[in-house]
Image (cartoon, rainbow, N blue to C red):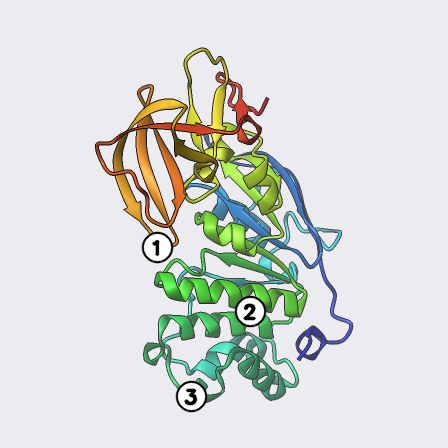
Amino acid sequence: MGAGAILGENAPVSSIQLENISRHWGESRALDGITFEAAAGSFVVLLGPSGCGKSTTLRLIAGLDYPTAGTIHIGGRDVTRLPPAQRGLSMVFQSYALFPHLSVAENIVFGLRVRKAEGIDAKLKRVADMLGLEKLLQRKPSQLSGGQQQRVALGRAIIAEAPVCLMDEPLSNLDAQLRGEMRREIRALQQRLGVTMVYVTHDQTEAMTMADRVVLLRAGRIEQVGSPEDLYERPATAFTASFIGAPPMNLLQLEGERDTVGVRPEDVHIGAEGLAARVGAVEYLGADSLVAARAQGQDLLVRVPGRAAARAGDNVRIAWDRGNEHRFDSQTGGRK
């Protein structure tokens, strides 16, 4: 079933533009002049640590709050001061926000019934078939697993036929295995429907595996915008380098070097030459191992395939190819 079967053959697809958006509460600056665009039909992830402004940005796009300064356009229309109902979007909340006294079917079509929309039963069947909820329509939310509740929340968003869908950390309440499954499902669903999706998370694995573009936020400002590959392979700042990657990039202040030297754990190797280091711990992960070592008074990680020969307490030498180095200004953190 293609996007047209759910959203209509001529369903609009909307881009989103934020221009110099700020949100202040007195002296507190939640956002300070952020600008970015989510192209029509793209999957954009707002990523960053707690308190960086991700959810505030999403609330401003949704119309649940208004900016102190700046403009927001959806589908080329200025919606900066419009209420949520006039913005042409749907939203999936972290809590799922399901009505406990209503059935799955009633939860999914609630918004359509309020608006007295036509063709509700046919739309419900299509959405239920798409999400595998056909046999659960008469159950209450308390009778569902976390993953099933997530699908109901998705169904309610899809059936709204909005060209923009906003998601606020929708997988944070699920266990690790189910999060992985739902990541793939949500991404496939977005591509199938062709909607513009803005997705908030603090989990960089979600950002790397789902996004067309990542907007990395730090303390209310944009640190870097780009594809997951851009942020991983060419981080614009030391902060980006330290935030993206599992484990993140090693950032070192080496003797005789004025710059901060960055190198990914997978690009470091243990051999006969290089920096003298002492192994602190070894984590065996199956396909590879992480060796935590200390060199020149600094901690760093080495990723090696399979089982590591090194053991805690060993004195080793570590090195890397200069072509794999990233260099950052030691004062500003910017890439050099």
In the rendered view, would you say 294 is above or below 8?
above
Q: The residue tagged with tag 3: helix, strand or loop?
A: loop
The residue indicated by pointer 1 is 286
Residue extending farthest to the left is: 313
Q: The residue tagged with tag 1: helix, strand or loop?
A: loop
Residue extending farthest to the front is: 272
- What is the three-letter code of the residue carrying label 2? Ala
Q: Residue at x 66, y 80 (%)?
A: 1
In the rendered view, would you say 46 is above or below 176?
above
- What is the three-letter code of the residue carrying label 3? Gln
Chain-order first, disc 3 or disc 2: 3
- Using the numbered discs, state the Cα–Cα distance from disc 3 to disc 2 in whole angstroms: 19 Å
Asked if disc 2 and disc 1 are in contact, CB closer than 8 Å, the reply is no
Q: Which numbered dot is residue 138?
A: 3
**Number of labelled discs?**
3
Could you tell me which quadrant the C terminus lies in?
top right
Asked if disc 3 and disc 1 are in contact, CB closer than 8 Å, the reply is no
